[in-house]
């Protein structure tokens, strides 16, 4: 993340995203596939590490192998195989949504995962239960812990849609856009930007 000052002098936290060039590698039609969609490829991939089937797929589109391939429905910008989609499909001031996978944080306890305060404090006989969840419910009935209870578990590594983002600046010569706020994922991860 970085930050930008606007003309009023307000500092806005923002994220720089490389949005293109994306090549149309496949076009799906209602007659042949049952629905309409466009498959976009982004980022150059080594020929050596590309499976043979994908090599043929990219050769049909007359392009080099791509790192990431994603299908987009209701996409009216590019219609033909081999067309290139750049950052110029967006405009400064557009409201966009970023979809990505958040950072994985592994197995976390209730204090970090759900914001519990822990049990008691350091007095009242506590010695190793400071970050424990505490009492979980009745004993003889129902004699179990209900599903869905907020307990420790895997945190992060989830598909997230971040709405309410605004395009602050576009650099078409480098295919970069500056978006207000943060987007899900680690540095250099892939995100989908929707209008």
Image: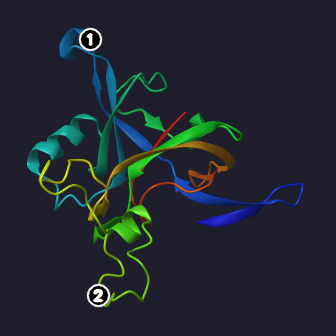
Q: Report the residue marked by disc 2.
A: 128
Looking at the image, is mark 2 or mark 1 nearer the viewer? 2
Q: Is residue 32 above or below residue 41?
A: above
SS class, disc 2:
loop
Which coloring applies here?
A: rainbow
Q: Which mark, residue 21? A: none
Whether residue 63 is visible, yes or no, is no
Q: Residue reaching furthest top? A: 31
Neighbour tally class for label 2: few under 14, some 14-19, many 20 plus, Cα within 10 Å: few
Q: Residue 86 versus residue 15: which sits nearer the camera?
A: 15
Q: How many marks?
A: 2
| Quarter of the image with the C terminus in it | top right
Image coords of residue 188 (percent x, y): 42, 64
**Between marks 2 and 1, how big is the CA–CA gap?**
62 Å
Image coords of residue 74 (percent x, y): 42, 21
Image coords of residue 52 (percent x, y): 9, 48
Q: Report the residue marked by disc 1.
A: 30
Neighbour tally class for label 1: few under 14, some 14-19, many 20 plus, Cα within 10 Å: few
Q: Is residue 104 above or below residue 70?
A: below
SS class, disc 1:
helix
At 71% across and 39% down in the image, what residue appears? 93
Q: Is residue 178 above or below residue 106?
A: above
| Quarter of the image with the N terminus in it | bottom right
Whether residue 88 is visible, yes or no, is yes
Image coords of residue 73 (percent x, y): 37, 25
Q: Residue reaching furthest front? A: 140
State yes or no: discs 2 and 1 in contact (Cβ < 8 Å). Answer: no
Q: Which of marks 2 and 1 is nearer the N terminus?
A: 1
134 left or right, relative to 6: left
Q: Residue 133 versus residue 82: which sits nearer the camera?
A: 133
132 left or right, relative to 166: left
At 38% across and 39% down in the image, what residue appears? 23
């Amino acid at each position: 993340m970085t930050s930008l000052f606007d003309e009023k002098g307000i500092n806005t936290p923002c994220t720089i995203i490389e949005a293109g060039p994306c090549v149309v590698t496949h076009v799906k039609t209602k007659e042949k596939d049952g629905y309409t969609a466009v498959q976009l490829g982004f980022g150059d991939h080594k020929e050596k590490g590309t499976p043979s089937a994908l090599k043929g797929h990219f050769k049909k589109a007359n392009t080099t192998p791509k790192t990431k391939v994603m299908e987009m429905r209701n996409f009216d910008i590019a219609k033909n195989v081999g067309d290139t989609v750049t950052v110029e499909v967006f405009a400064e001031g557009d409201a966009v949504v970023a979809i990505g996978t958040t950072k994985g944080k592994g197995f976390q306890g209730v204090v970090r995962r759900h914001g519990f305060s822990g049990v008691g404090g350091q007095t009242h006989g506590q010695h190793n239960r400071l970050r424990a969840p505490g009492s979980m419910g009745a004993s003889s009935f129902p004699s179990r812990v209900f599903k869905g209870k907020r307990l420790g578990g895997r945190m992060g590594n989830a598909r997230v849609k971040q709405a309410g983002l605004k395009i602050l600046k576009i650099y078409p010569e480098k295919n970069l856009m500056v978006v207000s706020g943060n987007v899900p994922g680690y540095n250099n991860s892939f995100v989908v930007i929707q209008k």
